[in-house]
Each structure stands twice: as structure tokens, then as C-alpha cells.
Image (cartoon, rainbow, N blue to C red):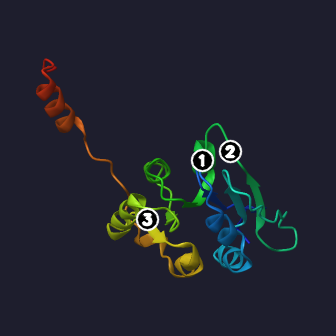
Amino acid sequence: MGEARDGVKVKRVVFVTVGTTCFDALVKVADCQEVKDELYRRGYTDLLIQMGRGSYLPAKSTGDDGSLAVDYFTFSLSIADHLRSASLVISHAGSGSIFETLQLGKPLIVVVNEDLMDNHQSELAEELAERKHLYCSRPLTLHQTIASMDLNSLVPYTPGDATPVAKLINRFLGFPEES
């Protein structure tokens, strides 16, 4: 469904990542027909799922039947290339995945794993969502998040300057100040 540019169909990839964890609830909901139909309706053409240690296997599809093309893999040495080529990223709430995606300027939906005890990751995702850098969802609400999202309302993330904090720590530890 991606718009044709000079007669060539533009590939718009949704990349789903669970990191090194097992987060079958995210993989299953990303693979459900309701979510795939909504992504396709919004102009996405491909769904690539990095499933980590999970046991649920998504249904592969070439997309030749006028639907979303779906593929998956377990692990990769680096997901940076997948993040760079994505038009939308749907991620677990790991801080590394969140900040790597935001620094690339990619639209991001973070799906919180509700099965984790003492889930500090949800606090990070919810705070960044409140600041409008990303959307925060749960597995059961992912479809609604996709259906209602307005990617133009997201605010680009600008990393803070850690230099003053580093200088303070160095001074505290007795290291000489750099000029």
C-alpha cells in the first residue's frame, strides 16, 4: 500500500524489537490480524519482528496478497540497521532500545511488559510519553495506540549535555579539571 514514487512502491517498514528478552505478548499482538490490518491501513508495507528468546513464531507473509509483508528473526549482532531503515519502531521498554531509536529520530511506540516485577522501565516509557517523545502502550492496547497515533505530534528527543555532571564527579573524585 506504500505510495508509489516514480512507479516504484515505497517500502515502509515497522520494526518490532524485544531485545534479548522473552516478550511473547508483544510478538503475539504485533502478529495479530487487527494490528497488521491497522498498520497496512496507515500505509506501512512490511513488518519485521525481532523476537528474542520468545517461543511464539509469527506468521510469515510475502504481502503479495495485498496485505502486510511479515518476517521475523531471533537475534542480530546489531539492530542499528533495522532501526535506521524503519518508518516506525515498536519496542519493549528497555532503555537502550528506547534511546537508540529516539536518537535516530524514529517514531516509537514502547510496549511495557506487564509481567516484569518492579518495572522501572514503565516509568521511563511513561515519562518520555508524557514529554511527547514517544507513545507508550501495553500489549492489550497496542491496536488502539496505532489507530489513534499522530506521528506529527511527537517532539524530537534531544539528549542532554552530561558534561557538567561528569565534571562534578571528576572533581568529587579528585581528578584534575581539563582546560
- Spatial CA distance of label 1 from label 3 is 21 Å
149 sits to left or right of 59: left
The answer to whether marks 2 and 1 mark residues whose Cβ atoms lie closer than 8 Å is yes
Mark 1 or mark 3: which is in front?
1
175 sits to left or right of 150: left
| 1 or 3: tag closer to the N-terminus | 1
Residue 164, percent from left and from top:
17, 37
Q: Which residue is drawn at 45% across and 69% down?
A: 135
Residue 7 appears anywhere in the view: no
| Helix, strand or loop status at disc 1 | loop
- Give above or below for 77 relative to 171: below
Residue 22 appears anywhere in the view: yes
| Type of amino acid under label 3 | Leu
Residue at numbered disc 3: 134
Residue at numbered disc 1: 20
- Spatial CA distance of label 2 from label 1 is 8 Å
Residue at numbered disc 2: 75
